[in-house]
Image: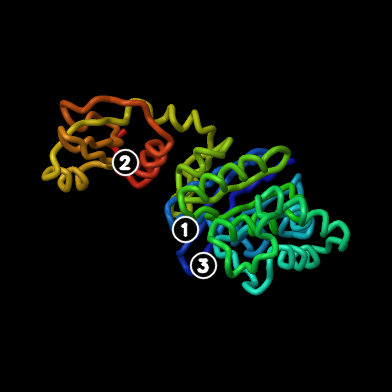
Amino acid sequence: MQLIIDHLSKKYRQDVWALSQINLNIRPGVLGLLGPNGAGKSTLMRILATITQASDGRILWNGTDIAKKPNLLREVLGYLPQDFGVYPNLNAVEFLQYIAAIKGLDARSARQRVDDLLVLTNLTSVAKRPLSRYSGGMRQRVGIAQALLNDPQLLIVDEPTAGLDPEERVRFRSLIAELSGERIVILSTHIVSDVEATATSIAMINHGNLITHDLPEKLLQAVEGKVWIWITSSQELATLKQQFLISSTARRSDGVHVRVVSAWQPNATAESVSATLEDAYLYLIGKANGQFVQ
């Protein structure tokens, strides 16, 4: 099983490129697609889902160009878009059976599949409740269930935890991790912790360009020795935010503990600390934007 993205580009208007020469070779596991809002992630997801056509380049699913044979991919595709809508007056069983019928599942198979997915997504106890009474996290779980109805080989989820509370986010991450197995899962998000908890590989996109695609540990190696902590005052914090890329702050009795991502030691009292994936993300995005001296 292999998904190849070959020199993929998308132009919306003259000289406005949402994507530019994207190259990825994706195999089973969870690919975390990271990037700021507006980076081009959703455009890439829509092209992969055969909803939008690329301006240039191609996508190969097991060696076949999906632009020429889109149904070959659609038959094995599960897709949860960023703006997932439901029919509020239907309950989860009715909604999933309706989507199953659209996907061409026979009635008996659909009933069994819906029951199995309600268990998988922990929705059995609320299966007969109208979707209008579901929380955001519960609706997202229904969204995953509908994406899994055809037991897809390629599962695409776009910003799935946006707007969820911390408990729902953790539950959703666990579900995504469980679903990888012998399928390709692409998790598109700007929330680094979602990727850190689930991804077997990470691709970063910024301004429509692919910055990197590598294993999480390789990305951490790239920023090792470039993360610093030192103590400053609240009065100096505003100035420091203009001078450095600050990944976090913590107020303590002895002052503000500032965590900075920088290619050089930002202060004589700054101490080097181990990097996190969020540090790596901030560093590589900053590097792409020309914020760091190499």
Q: Judge the density around disc 1: few (<14), some (14-19), many (≥20) Cα neighbours within 10 Å.
A: few
Mark 3 and mark 2 in contact? Answer it, CB < 8 Å: no
For disc 1, the marked residue is 163
| Amino acid under disc 1 | Gly
Question: Which quadrant of the rendered structure holds the N terminus?
Answer: top right
Cα distance between the residues tagged 3 and 2 = 33 Å
Q: Residue at x 45, y 44 (%)?
A: 192
Secondary structure type for disc 1: loop
> Which comes before the other along the chain, label 1 or label 2?
1
Residue 12's tag is 3
Residue 130, given in percent of the width and then of the height, sits at: 64, 69
Residue 256 sits in quarter: top left
Residue 98, relative to residue 183: is it above or below? Answer: below
Residue 75, relative to residue 102: is it above or below? Answer: above
Q: Residue at x 78, y 60 (%)?
A: 71
Residue 9 shown left or right of residue 211 in the figure: right
Q: Residue at x 58, y 67 (%)?
A: 133
For disc 2, the marked residue is 247
Q: Nearer the viewer, mark 1 or mark 3?
A: 1
Q: Judge the density around disc 2: few (<14), some (14-19), many (≥20) Cα neighbours within 10 Å.
A: some
Secondary structure type for disc 2: strand
> Which comes before the other along the chain, label 1 or label 3?
3
Cα distance between the residues tagged 1 and 3 = 28 Å
Residue 142, given in percent of the width and then of the height, sits at: 65, 58
Residue 220, given in percent of the width and then of the height, sits at: 44, 30
Residue 109, given in percent of the width and then of the height, sits at: 86, 56
Q: Residue at x 36, y 39 (%)?
A: 283
